[in-house]
Amino acid sequence: MRNVAQKRGADAPAKQPRVSLRTAATEDSLRKMALAQLTPALVLSAVPWRVIRSRRGQRHMPGLYWSSTTGAHVGYESRLELARLLLADMDRDVVAIAEQPFMVFDDTRRHVPDFLLGRADGSVVIVNVKPADKLAEPRIADALAWAGEVFATRGWEHEIWSGTDAQVLANVRFLSGYRRASLLHAPDVATARALPDRDLDVAGAEAALLGAGVSEPRPVVLHLLWSGALRTDLGRPLTSSSELEVSR
Protein backbone atom coordinates (compact mmCIF):
# COMPACT_ATOMS: atom_id res chain seq x y z
CA MET A 1 0.00 0.00 0.00
CA ARG A 2 2.82 2.41 0.74
CA ASN A 3 4.45 1.64 -2.64
CA VAL A 4 1.26 2.70 -4.41
CA ALA A 5 1.30 6.04 -2.61
CA GLN A 6 4.94 6.59 -3.47
CA LYS A 7 4.28 6.07 -7.19
CA ARG A 8 1.90 9.02 -7.15
CA GLY A 9 4.87 11.27 -6.62
CA ALA A 10 6.31 13.18 -3.74
CA ASP A 11 4.38 16.29 -4.75
CA ALA A 12 0.96 14.65 -4.47
CA PRO A 13 -0.83 16.10 -1.43
CA ALA A 14 -2.04 13.58 1.13
CA LYS A 15 -5.80 13.56 1.51
CA GLN A 16 -7.23 14.29 4.92
CA PRO A 17 -8.59 11.26 6.78
CA ARG A 18 -12.23 10.49 6.21
CA VAL A 19 -14.68 8.26 8.02
CA SER A 20 -17.46 5.91 7.08
CA LEU A 21 -20.27 4.96 9.44
CA ARG A 22 -23.57 3.16 9.17
CA THR A 23 -26.83 4.76 10.26
CA ALA A 24 -28.64 1.42 10.06
CA ALA A 25 -27.79 -2.23 9.51
CA THR A 26 -28.18 -1.99 5.73
CA GLU A 27 -25.73 -1.41 2.90
CA ASP A 28 -27.49 1.75 1.70
CA SER A 29 -27.10 3.43 5.12
CA LEU A 30 -23.40 4.20 4.60
CA ARG A 31 -22.31 7.80 5.27
CA LYS A 32 -18.89 9.23 4.48
CA MET A 33 -17.47 12.51 5.75
CA ALA A 34 -14.27 14.20 6.80
CA LEU A 35 -13.05 13.15 10.22
CA ALA A 36 -13.28 16.79 11.30
CA GLN A 37 -17.06 16.63 10.72
CA LEU A 38 -17.62 13.54 12.82
CA THR A 39 -19.22 14.18 16.22
CA PRO A 40 -19.84 11.82 19.12
CA ALA A 41 -23.58 12.33 18.63
CA LEU A 42 -23.34 11.03 15.06
CA VAL A 43 -21.36 8.00 16.20
CA LEU A 44 -23.77 7.19 19.01
CA SER A 45 -26.75 7.40 16.65
CA ALA A 46 -25.09 4.95 14.23
CA VAL A 47 -24.85 1.17 14.34
CA PRO A 48 -21.60 -0.80 14.69
CA TRP A 49 -19.46 -0.73 11.56
CA ARG A 50 -19.37 -4.51 11.32
CA VAL A 51 -21.42 -7.33 12.74
CA ILE A 52 -19.65 -9.36 15.41
CA ARG A 53 -19.77 -12.95 14.28
CA SER A 54 -18.92 -16.25 15.91
CA ARG A 55 -18.07 -19.60 14.41
CA ARG A 56 -17.22 -23.01 15.70
CA GLY A 57 -13.59 -23.40 16.69
CA GLN A 58 -12.68 -19.71 16.63
CA ARG A 59 -9.96 -18.54 19.04
CA HIS A 60 -11.71 -15.41 20.31
CA MET A 61 -14.86 -15.36 22.41
CA PRO A 62 -17.20 -12.61 21.18
CA GLY A 63 -20.48 -11.71 22.78
CA LEU A 64 -22.90 -9.07 24.00
CA TYR A 65 -22.71 -7.27 27.33
CA TRP A 66 -25.62 -5.34 28.84
CA SER A 67 -24.19 -1.95 29.81
CA SER A 68 -25.54 0.05 32.72
CA THR A 69 -24.08 3.15 31.04
CA THR A 70 -25.98 2.79 27.77
CA GLY A 71 -28.96 0.76 29.00
CA ALA A 72 -28.43 -1.56 26.04
CA HIS A 73 -26.19 -4.33 24.80
CA VAL A 74 -22.65 -3.54 23.65
CA GLY A 75 -20.74 -6.03 21.54
CA TYR A 76 -17.21 -7.24 22.11
CA GLU A 77 -14.94 -9.47 20.04
CA SER A 78 -12.75 -11.04 22.73
CA ARG A 79 -12.49 -11.56 26.46
CA LEU A 80 -9.88 -8.82 26.54
CA GLU A 81 -12.33 -6.38 24.95
CA LEU A 82 -14.95 -7.44 27.50
CA ALA A 83 -12.52 -6.60 30.30
CA ARG A 84 -12.04 -3.07 28.96
CA LEU A 85 -15.78 -2.75 28.49
CA LEU A 86 -16.40 -3.67 32.14
CA LEU A 87 -14.00 -0.96 33.29
CA ALA A 88 -15.65 1.62 31.04
CA ASP A 89 -19.11 0.66 32.27
CA MET A 90 -18.09 1.15 35.90
CA ASP A 91 -16.31 4.45 35.24
CA ARG A 92 -18.47 7.34 36.50
CA ASP A 93 -16.83 9.69 34.00
CA VAL A 94 -17.92 7.58 31.02
CA VAL A 95 -21.42 8.47 29.82
CA ALA A 96 -21.45 6.86 26.35
CA ILE A 97 -20.00 3.71 24.79
CA ALA A 98 -20.02 2.63 21.15
CA GLU A 99 -18.37 -0.51 19.79
CA GLN A 100 -16.87 -0.78 16.29
CA PRO A 101 -18.03 2.84 15.88
CA PHE A 102 -16.78 3.70 12.37
CA MET A 103 -14.02 3.18 9.84
CA VAL A 104 -11.38 5.87 9.37
CA PHE A 105 -9.36 5.82 6.15
CA ASP A 106 -7.12 7.73 3.76
CA ASP A 107 -5.58 6.86 0.42
CA THR A 108 -3.51 4.00 1.80
CA ARG A 109 -4.95 2.88 5.14
CA ARG A 110 -8.16 2.07 6.92
CA HIS A 111 -8.89 1.31 10.54
CA VAL A 112 -11.90 0.37 12.70
CA PRO A 113 -11.34 1.12 16.41
CA ASP A 114 -12.78 -1.14 19.09
CA PHE A 115 -14.63 1.44 21.20
CA LEU A 116 -15.52 5.10 21.42
CA LEU A 117 -16.00 6.34 24.99
CA GLY A 118 -17.73 9.65 25.66
CA ARG A 119 -16.93 11.38 28.94
CA ALA A 120 -19.17 13.62 31.02
CA ASP A 121 -16.94 16.62 30.28
CA GLY A 122 -17.50 16.18 26.54
CA SER A 123 -14.11 14.65 25.77
CA VAL A 124 -13.74 11.49 23.68
CA VAL A 125 -11.47 8.47 24.04
CA ILE A 126 -10.93 6.07 21.15
CA VAL A 127 -9.89 2.66 22.50
CA ASN A 128 -8.01 -0.06 20.68
CA VAL A 129 -7.64 -3.31 22.60
CA LYS A 130 -4.62 -5.43 21.75
CA PRO A 131 -2.80 -8.19 23.67
CA ALA A 132 0.53 -6.98 25.01
CA ASP A 133 2.46 -9.63 23.09
CA LYS A 134 1.12 -8.23 19.80
CA LEU A 135 2.15 -4.62 20.30
CA ALA A 136 5.73 -5.13 19.12
CA GLU A 137 4.66 -6.57 15.77
CA PRO A 138 5.60 -3.95 13.15
CA ARG A 139 2.29 -4.11 11.27
CA ILE A 140 0.22 -3.64 14.43
CA ALA A 141 2.52 -1.00 15.93
CA ASP A 142 2.45 0.96 12.68
CA ALA A 143 -1.35 0.78 12.40
CA LEU A 144 -1.89 1.92 15.98
CA ALA A 145 0.62 4.74 15.65
CA TRP A 146 -1.19 6.00 12.55
CA ALA A 147 -4.56 5.78 14.32
CA GLY A 148 -3.22 7.77 17.26
CA GLU A 149 -1.94 10.52 14.95
CA VAL A 150 -5.25 10.67 13.09
CA PHE A 151 -7.42 10.89 16.20
CA ALA A 152 -5.13 13.52 17.71
CA THR A 153 -5.96 15.82 14.77
CA ARG A 154 -9.62 15.55 15.86
CA GLY A 155 -8.71 16.35 19.47
CA TRP A 156 -9.60 12.86 20.64
CA GLU A 157 -7.54 10.77 23.01
CA HIS A 158 -6.30 7.43 21.71
CA GLU A 159 -5.86 4.59 24.19
CA ILE A 160 -4.11 1.31 23.44
CA TRP A 161 -5.25 -1.10 26.16
CA SER A 162 -3.71 -4.48 26.92
CA GLY A 163 -4.97 -5.22 30.42
CA THR A 164 -4.95 -4.01 34.00
CA ASP A 165 -4.28 -5.23 37.53
CA ALA A 166 -5.77 -8.72 37.93
CA GLN A 167 -7.26 -7.97 41.36
CA VAL A 168 -8.93 -4.78 40.15
CA LEU A 169 -10.42 -6.62 37.19
CA ALA A 170 -11.62 -9.49 39.39
CA ASN A 171 -13.40 -7.03 41.69
CA VAL A 172 -14.95 -5.10 38.82
CA ARG A 173 -16.13 -8.30 37.18
CA PHE A 174 -17.71 -9.40 40.48
CA LEU A 175 -19.39 -6.03 41.07
CA SER A 176 -20.77 -5.99 37.53
CA GLY A 177 -23.21 -8.65 38.68
CA TYR A 178 -24.90 -5.93 40.73
CA ARG A 179 -25.02 -3.22 38.04
CA ARG A 180 -28.75 -3.41 37.28
CA ALA A 181 -30.52 -0.90 39.50
CA SER A 182 -33.90 -2.12 38.21
CA LEU A 183 -33.42 -5.43 40.05
CA LEU A 184 -33.15 -3.68 43.41
CA HIS A 185 -35.86 -2.19 45.60
CA ALA A 186 -35.62 1.55 44.89
CA PRO A 187 -36.44 2.65 48.47
CA ASP A 188 -33.62 0.42 49.74
CA VAL A 189 -31.17 2.09 47.37
CA ALA A 190 -32.39 5.52 48.50
CA THR A 191 -31.88 4.50 52.14
CA ALA A 192 -28.33 3.36 51.35
CA ARG A 193 -27.54 6.60 49.54
CA ALA A 194 -28.51 8.46 52.69
CA LEU A 195 -25.94 6.64 54.82
CA PRO A 196 -24.06 9.08 57.03
CA ASP A 197 -20.69 10.19 55.68
CA ARG A 198 -18.54 8.33 58.18
CA ASP A 199 -16.02 5.53 58.13
CA LEU A 200 -17.62 2.15 57.51
CA ASP A 201 -16.63 -1.21 56.20
CA VAL A 202 -18.87 -3.48 54.12
CA ALA A 203 -20.13 -5.33 57.18
CA GLY A 204 -20.82 -2.04 58.99
CA ALA A 205 -22.77 -0.65 56.04
CA GLU A 206 -24.83 -3.82 55.86
CA ALA A 207 -25.56 -3.62 59.58
CA ALA A 208 -26.59 0.03 59.27
CA LEU A 209 -28.98 -0.82 56.44
CA LEU A 210 -30.44 -3.74 58.37
CA GLY A 211 -31.09 -1.35 61.22
CA ALA A 212 -32.80 1.02 58.78
CA GLY A 213 -35.17 -1.71 57.62
CA VAL A 214 -33.39 -2.98 54.50
CA SER A 215 -33.90 -6.74 54.61
CA GLU A 216 -31.22 -7.66 52.01
CA PRO A 217 -28.49 -5.07 52.31
CA ARG A 218 -25.58 -6.79 50.55
CA PRO A 219 -26.83 -6.43 46.94
CA VAL A 220 -27.55 -2.77 47.68
CA VAL A 221 -24.06 -2.12 49.06
CA LEU A 222 -22.44 -3.89 46.11
CA HIS A 223 -24.59 -1.96 43.64
CA LEU A 224 -23.50 1.32 45.21
CA LEU A 225 -19.88 0.22 44.91
CA TRP A 226 -20.48 -0.47 41.22
CA SER A 227 -22.21 2.85 40.64
CA GLY A 228 -19.54 4.83 42.51
CA ALA A 229 -21.80 6.05 45.30
CA LEU A 230 -19.52 4.07 47.59
CA ARG A 231 -15.79 3.59 47.04
CA THR A 232 -13.21 1.12 48.23
CA ASP A 233 -9.70 0.00 47.29
CA LEU A 234 -10.32 -2.32 44.35
CA GLY A 235 -6.67 -3.28 44.29
CA ARG A 236 -7.29 -5.49 47.32
CA PRO A 237 -9.65 -8.47 47.70
CA LEU A 238 -13.20 -7.34 48.38
CA THR A 239 -14.36 -8.68 51.76
CA SER A 240 -16.79 -7.77 54.53
CA SER A 241 -13.96 -5.81 56.20
CA SER A 242 -13.19 -3.69 53.10
CA GLU A 243 -13.26 -0.03 54.12
CA LEU A 244 -15.81 2.18 52.39
CA GLU A 245 -15.97 5.87 51.55
CA VAL A 246 -19.17 7.68 50.65
CA SER A 247 -18.88 9.65 47.38
CA ARG A 248 -20.40 13.09 47.42
Image (cartoon, grey):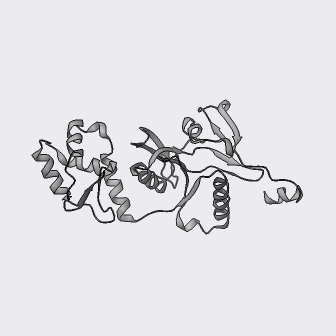
Is residue 19 visible in the rendered structure shown here?
no
Count how many numbered circles sit on residues in the image. Answer: 0
Task: Name the residue furthest left.
Answer: 211
Tell whether 44 sits left or right of 212.
Answer: right
Compared across the picture, whether 109 is left or right of 25 comes to right
In this rendered view, identify the residue nearer to me: 47 or 224. 224
Query: Residue 30 appears in which quarter of the rendering?
Result: top right
Residue at the spot 12% in from the left edge and 46% down from the top edge? 210
Q: Which residue corresponds to the image point at 30% horizontal and 46% vertical from the top-left? A: 178
- Counting from the top left corner in percent of width and height, residue 82 is at 45, 52
- Above or below residue 141? Residue 176 is above
Q: Position of residue 94 (x, y in %)?
A: 45, 48
Residue visible at 79% across and 59% down?
A: 2
Residue 142 appears anywhere in the view: yes
- Could you say which quadrant of the image residue 43 lies in? top right
Q: Name the residue nearer the viewer: 88 or 61.
A: 88
Q: Name the residue nearer the viewer: 27 or 216.
A: 216
Depicted 33 relative to depicted 109: above or below:
above
Q: Where is residue 131 in the image (x, y as percent from the top left)?
A: 53, 63
The residue drawn where x is 26% and y is 60% is 238
**Residue 46 place in picture, x, y as percent:** 57, 36
The answer to whether residue 189 is left or right of residue 57 is left
Locate residue 232: give its quadrant.
bottom left
